[in-house]
Structures are given as structure tokens and as C-alpha cells.
Amino acid sequence: MRLTLLLGIALSLGACKKQQGEPPPPTDPNRPTPISDTEVKRGNDACQALIDKSCKCADSDKAPQKQESCALAKGYPEAIRVALEVAASPDSTRRDILQAHDSMRKTVKTCVELIAKLPTTGCL
């Protein structure tokens, strides 16, 4: 009888052991999925391309409007960084995270659109 009881306890304890290779449970199932590293890299690359092209144009043409475009373009990577920091903060609510993701995506969209408009300003 005792042997059966001890064997039952040992088996039940073994069944409770966490299986190796099992992914850890999410810290908060209500938190949105983070933006993928690929999307972040593409966004940063797009905004860096805007900086490179608009500042190259500003260096060759000293028009104040082109100088201003170069200066403004330099702020877009910072906007992406801040949005990602807000999204990663443990203090951020679900709504904060979703808004930060939206802000980051809108910033990237702006970079892409401004790159497309550069030829109309005389910049290639």
C-alpha cells in the first residue's frame, strides 16, 4: 500500500515537471506582438536613405528649403527609436503600444513618401 502511494506521488511530481524546449508563457497575453526586427530594419533603412539623399541634395544646392528638408529628415530615426521604446516599456498599456506601433509605421511611411518626392524638387 505504501509503495503504491509513494509510486503515485513520484509519478505525479514527475508529470508536473516543466518539459524542456517548451517556450515560456507570455508575460501578458494582452500585450500586442512586438514589431518584427525586419520591419524595424526596413523602416530605419528607409529613413536613413531619406537622410542620405536629402542631405546630399542640400550639400549640392544651398537653397534654404533643401537645407531644412535635410535637417528635418535627421529627426525621423529618432522618432522611430522613441516609438519602439514606448512600445517596449513595461509601463505601457495595450493602447500605448498600439499607438506607438502606429506612430512608427506612419514615420516610415513619411520617409518613403518623401524619398519618392525628392525628384520633383530637383534632387535625384
Image (cartoon, rainbow, N blue to C red):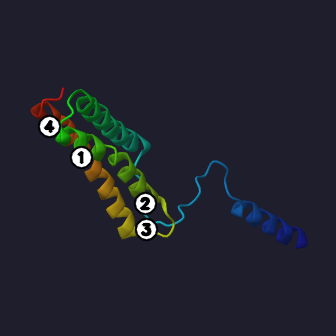
> Residue 30's mark?
3
Instruction: Return the residue at label 2.
Output: 87
User: Between residues 122 and 115, which one lies in front from this camera angle?
Assistant: 122
Task: Name the secondary structure under disc 2.
Answer: helix
N-terminal of the pair, mark 3 or mark 1, is: 3
Disc 2 versus disc 4: nearer the observer: 4
> Residue 24's mark?
none
Quick check: 74 above or below 124? Answer: below
> Residue 109's mark?
1
- Left/right of residue 101 with respect to residue 28 in the rendered view: left
Quadrant that contains the C terminus: top left
Q: Are marks 3 and 1 in contact (CB under 8 Å)?
A: no
Task: Name the secondary structure under disc 4.
Answer: helix
> For the residue carrying disc 4, how many other residues have a C-alpha within 10 Å: few (<14), some (14-19), or many (20+)?
few
User: x, y percentage for residue 83?
Assistant: 39, 57
Which amino acid does the dot numbered 1 rest on?
Answer: Lys
N-terminal of the pair, mark 4 or mark 1, is: 1
User: x, y percentage for residue 31?
Assistant: 44, 64
N-terminal of the pair, mark 2 or mark 4, is: 2
Which amino acid does the dot numbered 2 rest on?
Answer: Ala
